[in-house]
Image (tube, rainbow, N blue to C red):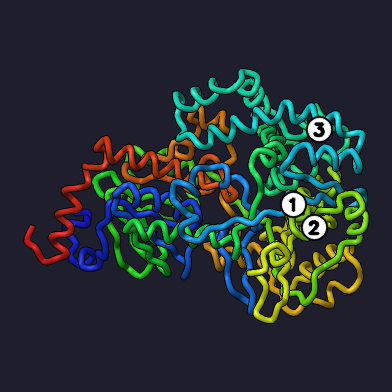
Amino acid sequence: MRRSILNAPVVLAKLRSMADAIVVGAGHNGLICAAYLARAGIDTELIEARASVGGAASTVTDLGARFNICNCDHTLIRGMPVIDELELEAYGLRYLESEASGINMFHDGSDPWVSFHESARTLDALAVSHPEQVDGYKRYLHDALPVAQLALDMARTTPGARPMITQALSRRATGAARLLNWSRRSVDDVFSDYFDDWHLTMPAISTGPTVWGVPPSAPGTGLAAATYATRHIIRTGRPEGGSGALTDATRESFEAAGGRVRCDARVDRLMIRDGRAIGVRLDDGNEHTARVIVAACDPHRVFVDWLDDVPSLAKRFVRNWKKQPTSEGYESKIDAVISDLPRYRVADLLAERLPDVDILGPTVSVSPSPEALAAAHADRKLGLVCDQPTLLVNVPSALDPTMLTAEGNHILSLEVLYTPYSLQGGWADSSEPDRWLQLWSQFLEPGILDTIVAKRTMTPVRYEAEFSMHRGHTPSYGGSPLAALLGSQRALTRYRSPITGLYLSGAGTFPGAGVFGAAGRNTADVVHRDFQRGLTRRFTSLQHRAAGVVMGVSK
């Protein structure tokens, strides 16, 4: 006879909580989902494997400094209602903004160009650095702004044919038609309608398809062309005190609503009874039960690693997940303490063109040519780092003095793509990180490397060890708003899995990775509506019966 939660006293003795909802994974989406649920009056427990919350959006202390785990620029989440609805400013969240939104440099040493939140300022800057591309950028703005606005509106809307069609119809027909068109095309193809100079297109590719791990020629990447337009709609900012100020404020909002956070708690198994999810078992043997489980983590790991007993209705679904290849991470990041601010060789040129712009305020992207990027994809498959990797560089302490060390030193963030998990020769003794610093130093006045007081390198292997990213890979939903509209990959776009009581959220679900928050908000809305409709009540009697056994009450 199969043991269940009701006929196994040893297991029952390990039960530690019975909540309405358990959210697994305290990255920013998990925190946001949990906070919305708690504020809606749903008894919610948040379970996190690490000792602190925040995941890839967090800020950590190391080497006597505070470092952001990933790039600290926040754009998309500032276009969501999350900050206002969760009252995050009341819990200390404050954004700082640089004058420019990005400095775009290139490995070939060609003229940089500067982008601004204000489209007019961007056009003025381009008129000086790339005058022949101004007309193309104007045509781009005319076409791209409606697409970007519609995509944002759809991300704010819980996915479903009716609400998303309503959003599409509320916009000009050209915006909806173009979003559909771009969703099917490659970003290379879309940009070719406007620009004949790759120096205008590669910065958007560097922060879009390159970060996603796909080539810009891939069909379905076309909406990455809306990157510039999105930044004209939403001003990029950085949380004062580091990226983790966002997740810290969200945790406070969650706990103020009665939510509970349990850190240092790694989920080992999903508990299934009568075909539905009833809780999670931790690797220490403790079990936590709830009416619903929200997995705000890598869905691949949920269906491959967490299930012993697969409900019959979900067997095909789980089988398909197990057939999918395991992705490997390809992003690395150098964090360093530096005794002096770097000075770029183009500083005087930019100061002459744009005297009011602090070049160290925004992120500097260093992009390769399209040919070099194609070589990077080929090298990555061979376990090699290309000669000219994409670099994303910022000095957080230049904009935010609270990020200075106690000794008054600055901090450097140098993100590098592509740096494969399965590096030939391994990462332990690799000289690659030193090479990346040398590459970066070529854009600077001499002596910058002598200012490095201490440094550390986050490689895909280290991300796996410290952040539970399987093989160093960050999951990312690869579909488009069109896919969400049509309900493709329903578990990832509607958030309900085929296992009753199990919901999905996080970067692997619509609308995808980045500091966005829409997936967490959308999942909470779906769960809340299911509670209101009574779809979660099947577990109530089981929960009460289990509580009686654990507390010594007779069955």
Q: Looking at the picture, does residue 201 appear above or below residue 306?
A: above
Between 86 and 153, the one lying in front of the other is: 86
Identify the residue at image location x=83%, y=30%.
136
Between 554 and 269, the one lying in front of the other is: 554
On residue 217, the disc is none
- SS category of the residue bearing label 3: helix
- Point out residue 487 in the picture as x, y percentages from the top left corner: 48, 30
Mark 2 to mark 1 CA distance (whole Å): 7 Å
- Mark 2 and mark 1 lie on one chain; the one further toward the N terminus is 1
Q: Quadrant of the N terminus?
A: bottom left
Residue, far left: 554
Type of amino acid under label 3: Tyr
Residue, far bottom: 407
Between 71 and 141, the one lying in front of the other is: 141
State which mark lies toward you, 3 or 2: 2
Type of amino acid under label 1: Glu
Identify the residue at image location x=68%, y=28%.
182
Q: Looking at the picture, does residue 541 appear above or below residue 344?
A: above
Can the viewer see residue 544?
Answer: yes
Q: Looking at the picture, does residue 263 appear above or below residue 544?
A: below
Residue hosting label 1: 99
- Point out residue 202 in the picture as x, y percentages from the top left corner: 80, 43
Residue hosting label 3: 137
Identify the residue at image location x=77%, y=56%.
391
Res. 329 image quadrant: bottom right
- Point out residue 305 in the picture as x, y percentages from the top left corner: 44, 55
- SS category of the residue bearing label 2: loop
- Point out residue 389 in the picture as x, y percentages from the top left corner: 80, 55
In this rendering, position of residue 206 left or right of residue 19: right
On residue 358, the disc is 2
| Disc 2 and disc 1 in contact, CB within 8 angstroms | yes
Mark 3 to mark 2 CA distance (whole Å): 24 Å
